[in-house]
Amino acid sequence: MNTTEAQASMVFVLDDEPAVRDSLRDLLESEHYQVRTFDSPKQFLQSATAMPNTCLILDLKMPEINGLDVLQAVMRKKPKLPTIVLTAYAEVPAVVSAMKSGAVNLLEKPCSDQLLLNAVRDALAQSEQRRDQPASVETLSAKLSKLSQREREILKELVAGQNVKEIALKLGTSPNTVRNQRGSILEKMAANSMADLVRIVLEAT
């Protein structure tokens, strides 16, 4: 994304911590994005407008309210707004819940500036296109055909929100084996992360 495109883009930041809001604003403005920050879900939902070339960065941990509830409220009010979720604990259940609630990406804090900027660029691209076209069932089937039977079983459990230890116990294997097979699943499904994997499956089902 060039400077002109960035200047035409708006990134909303919803976080209750002033230091986090200021840090994200500084980073994004250094890349020439327009930035609006909000310290409460109510303030954001009442005043922010989802348009092409906009996205939201949302901290999953909010005081006195579940971050997933905030995400779901955002999706109800602004369903076309691509949302990046930040969380200190990117465990499988949290990833699955966030993606099922409508997030386009989930990043574990602390994350590098470059990783966050890449996520913002991807989210803005989705906004500009009013969301990417969902992956076709045929494309998903082609990817699934590369998986072994055991990998399909693990994928099913991952998308259901089970963590590595729970899957290992259910399938009678070790957590390390599940982790290794999860890595193989990510590669065969052309997914960059668990969030990406869940998105691929959800968009085609």
Image: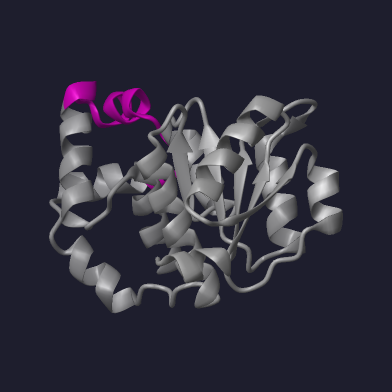
Q: Nearer the viewer, residue 82 or 47?
A: 47
Where residue 140 sits, quadrant-wise, is bottom left
Q: Is residue 171 magenta?
A: yes
Q: Nearer the viewer, residue 174 or 123?
A: 123
Residue found at x 42% / y 57%: 199
Region of the chain picked out in magenta, as a range = 159-176
Above/below status of 40 relative to 105: above
Query: Number of marks in the image?
Result: 0
Above/below status of 85 relative to 77: above
Would you say residue 12 is visible in this rendering? yes
Q: Quadrant of the N terminus?
A: bottom left
Please name the predominant secondary structure of the magenta segment in the image. helix
- Classify residue 175 as left or right of residue 54: left
Whole-percent x and y of residue 7?
Answer: 56, 65
Q: Quadrant of the C terminus?
A: bottom left
Q: Nearer the viewer, residue 155 or 89?
A: 89
Whole-percent x and y of residue 97?
Answer: 54, 43
Above/below status of 136 relative to 187: below
Q: Nearer the viewer, residue 110 or 201?
A: 110
Residue found at x 61% / y 74%: 52
Whole-percent x and y of residue 96?
Answer: 48, 44
Would you say residue 174 is visible in this rendering? no
- Classify residue 127 as left or right of residue 72: left
Where residue 134 sits, quadrant-wise, is bottom left
